[in-house]
Amino acid sequence: MSTYTQILYQIVFSTKRREKTLINRERLYKYIWGILREKNCHLYRIGGVEDHVHIVVGLHPMVAPALLVKDIKLSTSNFIVEEKLFPQFTGWQDGYGAFTYHVSSKNDLIEYVKNQEIHHQEASFKEEYISLLSEHGIAFEEKYLF
């Protein structure tokens, strides 16, 4: 019997101290797409603003979210430094958010990530992140978030 899965995630992580260093992010997004492709994950959308990234991805069943995020952060940090992509970039914040979604939410989720620039004209990353944690029923202490 074959293995069939549908594991839809939104992964969110920020720059260290939420520094607004990610200007002109297209090369970064293409690089992340390559990492996901190598891990047999299906990218639906990458988006974000100057201080954080959202990835909507279908995970391969053999890929653990924690290891995937670790690989993305390590690889992109090296890529950013080597390519001098974002001169002010000092690294990624520790931790990340990984939220699962039903496949019926996929299109809305893709649109949400696609429209991050518009969304963040009204809401800060902190407000957005707390909203995601609350929406998904994740208990947290605000002092450990940022």
Image (tube, rainbow, N blue to C red):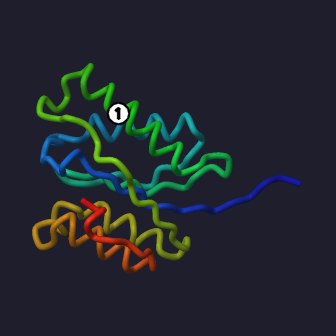
Q: Is residue 51 above or below residue 9?
A: above
Residue 21 to residue 4: above or below: above
Who is closer to the viewer here, 51 or 44?
51
Above or below, 98 against 90 in this view is: below
Q: Position of residue 103 (x, y in %)?
A: 55, 71
Give the structural element (helix, strand or loop) at label 1.
helix
Q: Quadrant of the N terminus?
A: bottom right
Q: Residues within 10 Å of mark 1 (few under 14, many from 20)?
A: some
The residue furthest right is 1
- Residue furthest top as drawn: 82
For the point 30% across and 76% down, the residue is 131
Image quarter of residue 8: bottom right
Residue shown at the point (33%, 25%) measured from the top left? 78
Residue 39 to residue 132: above or below: above
Closer to the camera in the image, 132 or 6: 132
What residue is disc 1 on?
A: 76
**Count of marks placed on residues:** 1
Instruction: Specify the amino acid type for callout 1.
Output: Thr
Q: Position of residue 18 (x, y in %)?
A: 18, 51
Question: What residue is rendered at 25% in x and 40% in y?
Answer: 26
**Percent position (x, y) of residue 137?**
45, 79
**Residue pictured at 47% horizontal, 74% vertical:** 105
Residue 135 vs residue 100: left or right?
A: left
The picture quadrant where one finds residue 10 is bottom left
On the image, the x and y values in percent for residue 146 come to 24, 59
